[in-house]
Every structure is written in C-alpha cells, then in structure tokens.
Amino acid sequence: MIKKSGKTYSRTVNSLFISHTSLNRFLQVSEAIILANDLLQNPEFYDRVATHPGFDLADVSPEIIAGLMCETHIKMSVHLYYATNAHLPIDGFDDISNPSCIHLNVWNINRSAASICNTIIHSCVHAVNAYNSQLDFGHGGNAAGGKDNTAPFWIGALAQRMVSDDEAVITPFRHDPDLPVKKVQIPDVDSLVGFSQSMWLTC
C-alpha cells in the first residue's frame, strides 16, 4: 500500500499469462511485459513517483499522478509495427487517437527488456493522462531533449532503473516522426492484452 497525505492506495495482485509460442521471435518484448507487470504491482514504484519533487509541464503533483496510476482502470494493447525508416533509432509513437495502444517499432526492439519496459511505462503515463484529460502531465512535443523531468520520460526512466537494478544507460522514448506504414502480421502478437485492473498488462 501507498499512504500519502492520509490517503492509502492499495494494489491488487493479478495473475499474469504470457503466450511465449506467439512471441518466440520477440522474447525481449515478452520479458518487458513481465517486467512492467511486476513493476505495476510494486508499491515502491508508486511511492517513488509520489515523492518526486515535481514534474515539468505538469499542472498536477507527482503524488496525484501516482494515485491516478493506481486507480485508473485501463485495458491496453501492445502493437508491433515497422517504422518508415529502418535506420533511425525510433522506439515507437504516442497514439493520440487511441492512447490505450502501445506501439513498438520492430526495427528497434533489439534492445534490453528494461529499455522496452521504459517505453511501455512511458506510454502508460500518457494513457492515464488521456483518461484524466482535465489534467495535463505530458511532455509537449516529441523531441526528447530537455524532457527528462516530464512525467512520461521521468517515470519511464524510473521504471528502467528499477527493473534493471539501476541500469547505467537510460534510454528515453525516441518517438517516430512519421505515421507507421506497415504493421507486423503475426497472429496474436498484434493483440497482446494488457493493463486491465489498474494498469495490469497481460497477453
């Protein structure tokens, strides 16, 4: 449980089901999903968000953001796609029209599961903000420079550090400047289900 300013946020531990047969080409994505699930059941994660001094470009406190992440019920999905340029270091894109979708660029998933977890949690912060649209705790434009202390980037980096025992190199979410042109056509991979019951990711 997390208790701040007299309010207690409780976490419900959920069962996790991963179909490795449908993810055998993308095992690091499967591992990242498991890491994200474990993290989202960890009260220490929310406590560390809640006690952060303050986020840039946010009109709400870190404590409230932590509470919203605990209390907002969202069912999300992970989608894999090919970015237009295979040579750019692009992790994915923020889907404004459907914020419950996490889009990962196949050209750039050959990285650590902890780094992919960073991307997943970054997208989750956006989703929570979208479902609480009367508030604003995004990061403005998509350029990563100068955004380290915005909620999506900072919480994503926190996730990467926590699931990797403080991995030395933190990779911020590198956004795709173009619309995706091709999704991965793999059964089940494009419909990974997640974050039902207070941000719970399963597939």
Image (cartoon, rainbow, N blue to C red):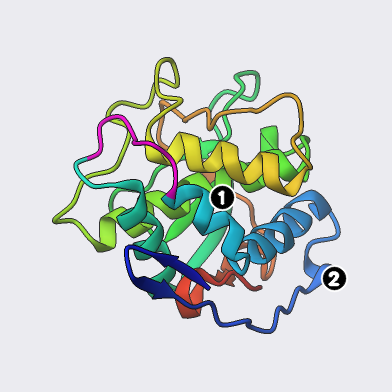
In terms of sequence position, does the residue under pointer 1 or pointer 2 come before the other? 2
Which corner quadrant holds the C terminus?
bottom right
Between 54 and 79, the one lying in front of the other is 54
Prevailing secondary structure class for the magenta stretch in the rendered image: loop
Dot 2 alpha-carbon crowd within 10 angstroms: few under 14, some 14 to 19, many 20 or more: few
Mark 2 residue type: Thr
- Residue in the image at 61% along x and 46% along y: 159
Question: Which residue bears the numbered disc 1?
Answer: 120
Q: Is residue 8 left or right of residue 182?
A: left
Q: Is residue 156 left or right of residue 127?
A: right
Provide the residue span drawn in magenta. 51-58
User: x, y (%) of residue 39?
Assistant: 64, 60
- The reply to whether the magenta stretch includes residue 195 is no
Question: Which residue bears the numbered disc 2?
Answer: 21
Between 36 and 70, the one lying in front of the other is 70
Position above or below: 112 against 74: above
Between 173 and 147, the one lying in front of the other is 147
User: x, y (%) of residue 34?
Assistant: 73, 63
- Residue in the image at 30% along x and 29% along y: 56
Position above or below: 82 against 77: above
User: x, y (%) of residue 111?
Assistant: 77, 35
Residue 98 in view of the camera: no
Residue 117 in view of the camera: yes
Q: Is residue 38 left or right of residue 58?
A: right
As helix, strand or loop, the secondary structure at mark 2 comes to helix
Mark 1 residue type: Ile
Dot 1 alpha-carbon crowd within 10 angstroms: few under 14, some 14 to 19, many 20 or more: many
- Residue in the image at 29% along x and 54% along y: 129
As helix, strand or loop, the secondary structure at mark 1 comes to helix
- Residue in the image at 73% along x and 53% along y: 29
Position above or below: 43 against 136: below
Label 1 to label 2: alpha-carbon separation: 21 Å
